[in-house]
Amino acid sequence: MVEVNEYFDGNVKSLVVNSNKGKRTVGVMMPGEYEFNTTTKETMTVVSGELSVYFAEEGEWEEFGEGASFDVPANSKFKAKVMQDTAYLCEYEQK
């Protein structure tokens, strides 16, 4: 079954798929700045567009373009700046 999530007044939308490889989301972020919280480790891949990501632990912004991936630790926060419509794939660590 596919689940649809909307965040930030509909500016971030994702489709959730639970498969034998675990939970995954495919989504789109419209231009803006967002802060996300995690409960499990996540690996995000930019499918189209680009993201500027701020990790508090590192104290700086990092750019991720099409095809780039980054890991987000469990139980953490990160900020994302989006300058153009950006599609992403998020893979959640299985427990």
Image (cartoon, grey):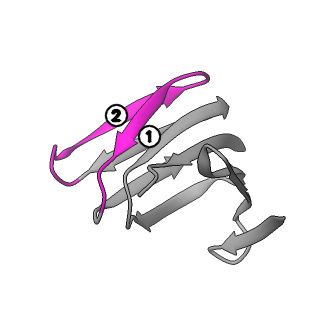
Is 35 located above or below residue 58 in the figure? below
Q: In what quadrant of the picture does the C terminus appear?
A: bottom left
The circle on residue 21 is: none
Point 28% across, 66% down: residue:
75
Point 42% across, 30% down: residue:
63
Residue 72 part of the magenta-drawn span: yes
Q: Residue furthest front?
A: 20
Position of 40 with respect to 89 (left or right) is left
What is the C-alpha distance between the residues marked 1 and 2?
5 Å
Residue 66 x/y as whole percent: 61, 23
The circle on residue 52 is: 1
Point 31% across, 58% down: residue:
74
Region rendered in magenta = 56-74
Instruction: Provide the residue designation for mark 2.
Output: 62
Indicate the amino acid at tag 1: Ser
Residue 31 x/y as whole percent: 64, 52
Position of 49 with respect to 78 (left or right) is right
